[in-house]
Image (spheres, grey):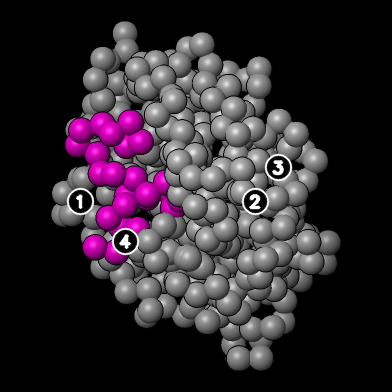
Amino acid sequence: MASEIFERDRHVTFLQMMYQLLPSPYQSQEINRLTLAYFVISGLDLLAAPDRLVDKEAVAKWVLSLQAHPRSQSELNNGQFYGFYGSRSAQFPSEDNDNGALLSRSVGNLASTYCAVAILKIIGYDLSSIDSESILTSMRNLQQSDGSFMPIHTGAETDLRFIYCAASIELIDVPVAICHMLGNWSGMDKEKAKAYIINCQSYDGGFGLTPGSESHGGATYCSVTSLRLMGFIEEDILSKDAESSIINVPLLLDWCLQKQAADGGFQGRPNKPSDTCYAFWIGSVLKVLGGHKFIDKKALHGFLLTCQSEYGGFSKFPGDFPDLYHSYYGFTAFSLLEEPGLKPLCVELGMSAIAAIGI
C-alpha cells in the first residue's frame, strides 16, 4: 500500500546509502558515475539533508580529478573537448581489438561536464578556480553549423539535450548549466542555438529532439529552459504578451497540459504511461511559462506517492524498484509541488534555488 505522505527521512537514508556504496545493478553505469553522483549530491541538497552527510572537500577533489586538460594551449583547437570524463575508467585509453594498439579515448563529454560543474556549484566550490578556458574554448568545437551540439568531439548524435547541457554549463549565474554556471557565453553561438531550437517546435506545440521529430517531454524541457537561460524568452510568459514570443506559447501550453494523464501523472508523449520523471520535465516547462497553476496538483501528488518506494527513492512506474534517476526527479517534482521540508527548485538548472544562486 502506497504511503500517503512524502517520506523525506527515508529518502535521505536512501541517498546516504547511495553516497557510501552503489548497489551492484549500477555496475553497467560505471561510465556515468559522475552523473549518478550528481543525482545523489543534488538530491541530498534538495532534501535539505545535514551538511555533515557529504564530505564537500573530498567530493570537490574527486570531481576536479576527472577534468581533461590539454597538453598545450594549441591543443584547445584540435577538435577535442576538454571537459570532464564520466568516471575514472573513462580516462583510460581503449584498445583496438584488431591490432592491439591503444586508441585515444575522447576527452570528456557535455553531459558529464554539466554534472561536474553542477556538483561543484551545489557544494559551494569557487567555479572561478577551475580550468573554464579549456572547457569553453573546446566546447565551441562541439557546436555544429546548424546550431546543435555533439556530446563528444566525434561519432555521436546531435540533438536538443546537448544544447541544454552546453547552455546550462556556461550560464549558471542564477539558473543551471555550463555557460550559465560559469557566467561566460564564449563557449557557444547563442543565435545559432536559438535558431535550431525554434526549428524543433512541432505542429502540436511541443518540441522534438531534432527538427521534424515527434514532440517529447524531455526535449521540450531542454528547449524552453535553454531559451530562458540564454535570455530569449521571459519567465511567466503567459502574464505578458505571449503572442510576441519567438515560440508558439499557447500551443505549447496546450500540449503540456494534455500530457497530464487520467492517473494524475505526466507522460512524455501521447499514449505512453505516466512516468515519475515527466512530473519534473513538463512541470518545469509549465513553471517557466507561468502555467503551473493549471496542473491538477492533488492528482499529481497522488500519482507520485504510488511511485514512492518503501525503501526510499522513487521508481519509474508504480510498483517498480526505485532508481537514482527517477528518485531525483521525484524529489524535484515534489519541490515543484512545494512539499514542506524540500528546498525551492531552480527549474532551469534542475537544482535547489539556493545552490543556483550560489548562497
Query: Tag 2 or tag 1, which sits nearer the N-term?
Result: 1
> Looking at the image, which residue is at 40% across and 29% down?
293
From the top left corner, tell me how far across and down residue 168 is, in percent. 51, 60
Q: Is residue 187 visible?
A: yes
3 or 2: tag closer to the N-terminus? 3
**Residue on which the image places disc 3:** 201
Q: Reply above or below: 209 against 317.
A: below
Question: Which residue is label 4 attached to?
Answer: 357
Mark drawn on residue 246: 2
Query: How far apart are the alpha carbons under marks 4 and 3?
Result: 30 Å
Mark 1–mark 4 Cα distance, whole angstroms, equals 22 Å
Name the residue: 36% across, 64% down.
Answer: 120
Q: Quadrant of the C terminus?
A: bottom left
Q: Which residues are magenta?
A: 334-359
Q: Within 10 Å of the Cα at label 1, are there few (<14), some (14-19), or many (20+) other Cα atoms?
A: some
Q: Is residue 151 left or right of residue 263?
A: right
Callout 3: helix, strand or loop?
A: loop
Evaluate whether residue 100 shows in this view: no
Q: In the rendered view, would you say 170 is above or below 323?
A: below
Q: Are marks 4 and 3 in contact (CB under 8 Å)?
A: no
Q: Is residue 352 magenta?
A: yes
Left or right position of 135 against 297 = right
Could you classify mark 2 by the number of other residues whose Cα lies within 10 Å: few (under 14), some (14-19), or many (20 or more)? few
Please state which amino acid type lies under the numbered disc 2: Ile
Q: Earlier in the sequence, mark 3 or mark 1?
A: 1
Residue located beneath label 1 in the image: 53
Estimate the x, y position of residue 326 in percent, counting from the top left.
45, 33
Residue at horizontal 54 percent and vertical 61 percent from the top:
230
At label 3, the amino acid type is Gln
